[in-house]
């Protein structure tokens, strides 16, 4: 069965190859009948008024900055009048912070002690 499939596939491949070789395609050549004319420099290409950016765009100028009365008025900038200074209480050390019973509360030994066993020291296992 496999040999039949291989023969059919090989025959189909050879047939397609022969058909592809014998095909004569026409009309694929590029015919250059319309040649582009040579480029020529025109007047607008070298005209300074076109390329001079100062003549096209009007340069904007900023007005001079002026000092206004509110800028130099001491009442406007004196913030000490409106701010009230808050006093914080000093930090204190409380008993629970330094009590030995509370600090070492979680250090109880609930786990059994680990013992070194013979297999741990066996040189044949750890080569």
Image: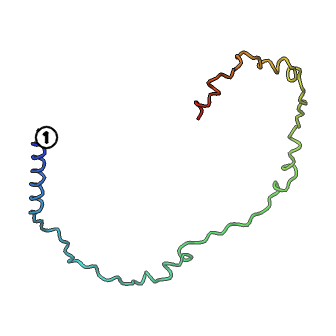
Colour scheme of the rendered structure: rainbow
Q: Secondary structure at mark 1?
A: helix
Question: Which residue sits at x=82%, y=21%?
Answer: 103
Quick one: quadrant of the N terminus? top left
Tell me if residue 71 comes above or below residue 45 in the rendering: above
Q: Which residue is mark 1?
A: 2
Picture coordinates of residue 102 (x, y %)? 82, 18
Left or right: residue 28 versus residue 116 is: left
| Rendering coords of residue 42 (x, y %) | 39, 83
Image x and y of residue 117, in percent: 65, 22
Q: Position of residue 77 (x, y in %)?
A: 84, 50
Seen from the viewer's position, the closer of residues 41 and 36 is 36
Quarter of the image with the C terminus in it: top right
| Residue shown at 90% from the left, 27% from the top | 92
Horizontal arrangement in the rendering, residue 89 relative to residue 40 (left or right):
right
Q: Is residue 91 above or below residue 30?
A: above
Q: Is residue 4 left or right of residue 59?
A: left
Instruction: Give the quadrant of residue 118.
Output: top right
- The residue located at (77%, 20%) in the rendering is 107
Q: Nearer the viewer, residue 87 or 126?
A: 126
């Amino acid at each position: 069965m496999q040999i039949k499939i291989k023969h059919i596939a090989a025959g189909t491949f050879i047939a397609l190859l022969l058909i592809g070789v014998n095909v004569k395609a026409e009309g694929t050549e590029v015919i250059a009948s319309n040649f582009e004319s040579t480029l020529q420099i025109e007047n607008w290409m070298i005209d300074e008024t076109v390329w001079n950016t100062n003549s096209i765009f009007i340069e904007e100028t900023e007005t001079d900055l002026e000092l206004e009365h509110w800028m130099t008025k001491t009442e406007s900038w004196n913030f000490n009048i409106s701010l009230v200074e808050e006093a914080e209480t000093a930090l204190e050390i409380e008993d629970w912070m330094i009590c030995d019973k509370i600090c070492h509360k979680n250090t109880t030994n609930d786990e059994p002690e680990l013992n070194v066993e013979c297999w741990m020291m066996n040189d044949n296992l750890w080569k």
